[in-house]
Image: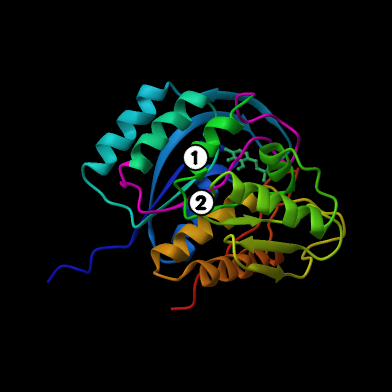
Amino acid sequence: MGKKPPRVVLTVAGGDPGGGAGLQADLRVFRALDLYGVSVITAITAQNTRTVDSVFPLPPEQVRSQLEVLLADINPLATKTGMLASVAIVNEVVRFARDGRLGRLVVDPVMTSTSGHELADAGIERDLLDLIRLADLVTPNIAEATRLTGIEILSMADMKAAAHSMMDMNARAVCITGGHLRGDPVDILFDGHDFIELTGRRAGALEQEFHGTGCLFSAAVAGYLAREMDLVAAVTAAKRLVTAAIDRAINPGQGLSVPDPPMLEP
Ligand code: PLP
């Protein structure tokens, strides 16, 4: 008797040789959630826990081939997109999403690293919106929400205004993560009707920054959607997982700490 087929989740993201962010981080989350992770790489970066040295986006045709060949064989229940790096790659991914081949879709609109390095073409925001409109959820942090909406975010009221603005741009649901504001991190989830405030506790030392937190969060939401949770439950569980991962953060290098997701209880 063969085993039950695995639940498959896909990440379409950049690679981080240091393992803290990007598709390496996503695959660790999928493993922790007892899912089978598959990955399409969009860009090769040269980085460690201290710095991003360079970014090399793959040719869009190569990303298309990876998706074509993978999806001809394996069908993901859910997909998360992370660093898409170039407008041309975004447009490739849009085509697959439009054809409904990616399953439930979570878009993490990665543009800049916590260490301040650009990870995407200037002006990618406009094309990202085409993908965001096809997604079950978009998960910008404060800086990404500002770049997508033009709204400066200093308070909860600003976060809500930015969420409204995202919905006006035809997002289906948005979760703005507030971890980069001061105080305990409050994320807001908005589906155009109800605001849900997800209040967390600031883990780690005061002012401490972590590498890969946004990647873990969006990967976890996609993972929980693949486990058939509804959106609110998936976002709530993903926030809990990220907090637990920050509590267990490790230092593989000499720079930023890397959150370490705990394995799901069987
Ligand atoms: N490198 C890659 C490939 C990423 O996808 C990301 C974030 O999504 C980063 C680096 C930046 O990670 P962080 O801002 O958490 O340091």
Q: Mark 2 Cα within 10 Å, few/some/many (few <14, many 20+)?
A: many
In contact (CB < 8 Å): disc 1 and disc 2: yes
Residue range in magenta is 99-122
Determine the secondary structure under disc 1: strand
Q: Residue at x 40, y 68 (%)?
A: 227
Q: How much space separates mark 1 and mark 2, taking CA atoms?
A: 9 Å
Give left or right: position of 2 versus 87: left
Q: Which residue occupies 54% across, 47% down?
A: 170
Q: Which residue is farthest bottom?
A: 266
Circle nearer the N terminus (1, 2): 1
Report if residue 20 is visible in the image: no
Amino acid beneath label 1: Ala
Which amino acid type corresponds to the residue marked 2 in the rendered image? Answer: Asp
The verdict on residue 173 being magenta is: no
**Residue 229 appears left or right of 67:** right
Residue at disc 1, CB closer than 8 Å to ligand 1: yes
- Return the x and y of residue 2 as percentages of the image width and height: 15, 67
* Depicted 250 relative to depicted 86: above or below: below
Label 1 sits on residue: 13
Q: Which image quarter is the C terminus in?
A: bottom left
Rendered image: mark on residue 26 = 2
> How far across and down, in percent of the image, does residue 217 sit?
59, 57
The total number of labels drawn is 2
Please report the residue visible at 75 percent of the width from the left and 34 percent of the height from the top: 116
Q: Which mark is residue 87?
A: none
* 257 relative to 254, above or below: below
Q: Nearer the viewer, residue 221 or 27?
A: 221
Image coordinates for residue 168, horizontal then vertical, percent: 60, 47
Ligand 1, by image quadrant, is top right
- Residue 13 location in percent, x, y? 49, 39
